[in-house]
Amino acid sequence: GAVVSQHPSRVICKSGTSVKIECRSLDFQATTMFWYRQFPKQSLMLMATSNEGSKATYEQGVEKDKFLINHASLTLSTLTVTSAHPEDSSFYICSALTDYGYTFGSGTRLTVV
Amino acid sequence: AQSVTQPDIHITVSEGASLELRCNYSYGATPYLFWYVQSPGQGLQLLLKYFSGDTLVQGIKGFEAEFKRSQSSFNLRKPSVHWSDAAEYFCAVGAQNAGNMLTFGGGTRLMVKP
């Protein structure tokens, strides 16, 4: 139980375009979703915390206008990277807190060319 | 603020040898502690966690970790490493009053020699 499905697993986009990453909780209701970014050979850095039905809370240094987070339902949270640039290329992972602990999506490898 | 330090960036061990990955945390109260494993290009898999109770925690794949409050440590151990254990390992700390967010250590990359 407590599975988070994250899509797409890989995406390549052109500089200046926007990319949407989805995380769906398959068998539970995710009140809170965490979004992390991981640069190559580095650790996971929390970008933002989203709560269903309210605005996301962004960590210091994360541009909220660039990384749009929507958590409109208890089973879906999305992260949209707007006007992507090569420096946004990274591995993005979502995580939800469940009754059993934290569960993570499988990650999205974003490459901006 | 909570923080996690994994002092060893890389560790290489021979297959069959024992393993210990170090993790030190900083937090004002009793933390929730986790160890995760990540294979290249993959998400995170939970190995074990500590919330309270017995300070020696058993996890999956033969891993265990011991919470030592006096040393602010939560080191991960395995008595005999298998080649399939080669991966990146992350220690993480969470706390109820920190918005439930997890803070990750920098990770330790484990390589296994045949």
Image (cartoon, coloured by chain):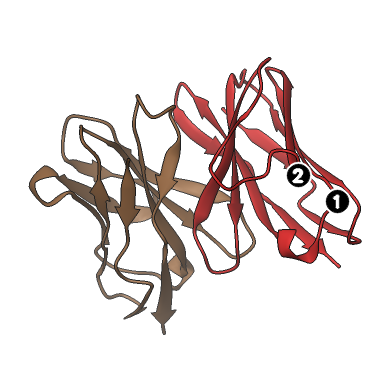
Chain colours: A red, B brown
Q: Is residue A89 visible?
A: no
Q: CA distance from mark 1 to mark 2?
A: 7 Å
Residue B78 visible in the snapshot: yes
Residue A83 shows which numbered tag? 1
Please say if A34 is above or below A93: above
Secondary structure of the residue carrying numbered label 2 = loop
Task: Indicate the chain on which mark 2 is placed.
Answer: A
Dividing the picture into quadrants, the one containing residue B83 is: bottom left
The residue shown at (26%, 49%) is B25
The answer to whether residue A69 is above or below residue A99 is below
Instruction: Give percent across and percent down for residue A31.
Output: 59, 19
Label 1 marks a residue whose chain is A
Q: Amino acid at mark 1?
A: Ser
Q: Going 27% across and 44% down the picture, which residue do you hit?
A: B58
Quadrant containing the N terminus of chain B is top left
Q: Which mark is drawn over residue B3?
A: none
In the rendered image, residue A25, in percent from the top left (x then y), is placed at 67, 27
Q: Amino acid at mark 2?
A: Lys
**Numbered label attached to residue A66:** 2
Question: Which quadrant holds residue A13?
Answer: bottom right
Residue at the farthest left position: B70
Q: Position of residue A1 (x, y in %)?
A: 56, 27
**Front-lying residue, B41 or A67:** A67
Which residue shows up at 26% across the image and 62% down it? B22
Marks 1/2 in contact by CB < 8 Å: the verdict is: yes
Disc 2 crowd rating (10 Å Cα; few below 14, some 14-19, many 20+) is some
